[in-house]
Image (cartoon, helix red, strand yellow):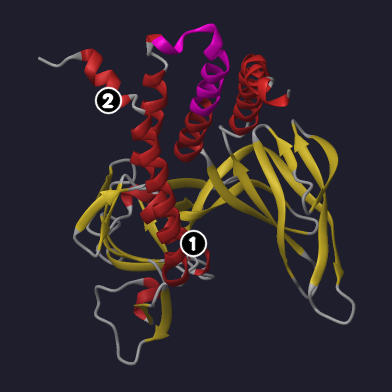
Amino acid sequence: MIDIKQLIKFISSPKVFSYTVVWLIVIVFFGTIAQKDVGLYASQVKYFSSYYFLFAGFLPLPGGRITIIIMTVNLASSLFKKNLWKMKKLGIIIVHIGGLLLLIGGGITAKFSAEGNMVIGEGESSDHVDDYHDMELAFVNTSLEDSLEYTIFDAPLLGEGKRIKYDKLGIQIDIIDHIKNVRIESRISPADSIYKGFLNDFVIIPKQPDKENTQNRPGLIFKIEGTGKETDGIYGAFLGQRVPDTFEIGGELFFTEFRRKRTYLPFAIELLDFKKVMHPGTNVAKSFSSEVNLIENKIPRRVLIQMNEPLRHRGYTFYQASFVDGLDKETTVLATVKNYGRMFPYISSIIMSIGLLIHLLINLPKMLKKRSPSSK
């Protein structure tokens, strides 16, 4: 029979917290070194956003998430110790609560936060954010009179070997290959009749993925059945494809679009003017800013977004990240973050500071009393 007291004593032991802190230092060290070879995103996924990772290809070791979970359980269980709940340890209790809030905030951020960017040309507006990493496949119905109808297949459905049955359109999609980075080449010989659209004239060839995931151009090869004998076959799509494949489904005209996952916002941002200041005698930007209209409920509000001066609205934060030079107009790139745990570090830091101050004030008389004999 499990002794609850002994279990709580073991789980809440300060040694457990010390070991997890040391292990976090080890993870940070190896994760930082690995960035040079695999890039920031891949290193983050392997070491910090995982429950475990394989060392030397076969030895499983605790990842960042399981380590943080152990630290959180350790801090939470330590609050159940009876000898902690004393007036003289009030400061320690408050510090523990502040640290626990910091870890909980980190978990909320890891689980629910989203990052992406918004690319807007001068005079244009956007109401969606493109994800940095996840992709989606869109079937766009162009047969409607006054609008486009989008059918979206999200990232979890697009893994190699996946099968999608979509009864509304009466089609079946088999994912043959999902490639992280591709290059496109013209065919040197006629294609087999099973290849349709873009793949009839070109081939999609896997390319060594870039260290920075945002620099890759993902591609997708998939087979469609149910559109008709002439249009059923194997299709290809890739990020940034200018001429999409088109086909008919049930008498309606569709085209496909393989793009970064979009999150639509309850408001829009219109770029009025983009300005940049260059370092003298160079082509390197010293600073840049975007004057925008924040449009919500058809009411515009003018805002200036500058470096280190982001726009915060409805839980989203828009940072001035970069820009794209154009021949006729400038284009701004706004890094966009939605972080549900954004306030936790501020709140927990204040709580821990108060706890440390209270602990100091409670123990100050004892410290002064110990020093008084030596001062005579």
Please provide percent x and percent y for residue 205. 35, 79
Q: Amino acid at mark 1?
A: Leu
| Image position of 83 with respect to 274: above or below | above
Q: Residues within 10 Å of mark 1 (few under 14, many from 20)?
A: some
Reading the chain from its start, which is encountered first: label 1 or label 2? 2
Q: Position of residue 97 (x, y in %)?
A: 52, 21
Element type at mark 2: helix
Q: Position of residue 81 (x, y in %)?
A: 37, 13
Q: In terms of depth relative to the viewer, which is nearer, 310 or 166?
A: 310
Locate residue 337 relative to residue 29 in the image: left or right: right
Q: At 56% across and 18% down in the image, what residue appears? A: 94
Q: Are marks 1 and 2 in contact (CB under 8 Å)?
A: no
Residue 67 relative to residue 55: left or right? right
- Residue 224 appears in which quarter of the rendering? bottom left
Quadrant position of the C terminus in the picture: top right
Query: What residue did someone put label 1 on?
Result: 40
Label 1 and label 2: CA atoms lie apart by: 36 Å
Visible residue check, residue 197: yes
Task: Please give the residue where the numbered disc 2 appears in the rendered image.
Answer: 10
Report whether 24 appears left or right of 329: left
- Position of the N terminus, as image quadrant, is top left
**Which residue occupies the extreme bottom position in the image?**
188
**Residue 284 is covered by the magenta coloring:** no
Q: Report the span colored magenta.
A: 83-100
Q: Which mark is residue 194?
A: none
